[in-house]
Amino acid sequence: MKMVRHAGRCMGRVQGVGFRVFVQGVARELGFTGWVKNMPDGSVVMEAQGDETLFGEFKERLQKGNGLCKVEHMTFEFRKNVEDETGFEVRK
């Protein structure tokens, strides 16, 4: 298994609709570590680290959403892996 880390930004109706907790749940289900956070511009940013083969599913599930959110635009780019990171947290 090759571990990779991606930094992402989701834009659209992604604040005030439980999106961060949704992202955290998806990440935990897939065994990812990292964090997710609301930004002042209305977007949600995150860093997620996990099995490279599962990132396609991660992105698809975020795009589909939780039924309340609407992701209109999503970007991801590679980051350096973080050693000894445990869990996936929602940041304030």
Image (cartoon, rainbow, N blue to C red):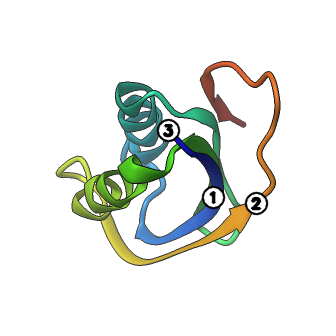
Q: CA distance from mark 1 to mark 2?
A: 5 Å
Query: Which residue lies at the image location 27% right of the left edge and 53% below the top edge?
Result: 61
Q: Nearer the viewer, mark 3 or mark 2?
A: 3
* Mark 3 closeness class: few <14, some 14–19, many ≥20 residues within 10 Å: few
* Mark 1 closeness class: few <14, some 14–19, many ≥20 residues within 10 Å: some
Q: Secondary structure at mark 2?
A: strand
* Mark 2 closeness class: few <14, some 14–19, many ≥20 residues within 10 Å: some
Q: Secondary structure at mark 3?
A: loop
Contact check, label 3 and label 1, Cβ < 8 Å: no
Query: Which residue lies at the image location 77% right of the left edge and 45% below the top edge?
Result: 81
Nearest the camera: 85 or 9? Answer: 85
Nearest the camera: 62 or 68? Answer: 62
Residue 77, picture quadrant: bottom right
Circle count? 3
In-image side of 76 versus 61 (left or right): right
**Circle 1 is placed at which residue position?**
6
In-image side of 48 versus 15 (left or right): right
In-image side of 92 versus 45 (left or right): right
Q: Amino acid at mark 2?
A: Arg
Contact check, label 1 and label 2, Cβ < 8 Å: yes
Q: CA distance from mark 3 to mark 1?
A: 16 Å
**Circle 2 is placed at which residue position?**
79
Give above or below for 72 relative to 9: below
**Circle 3 is placed at which residue position?**
1
Q: Percent x, y for residue 39? A: 69, 60
Contact check, label 3 and label 2, Cβ < 8 Å: no
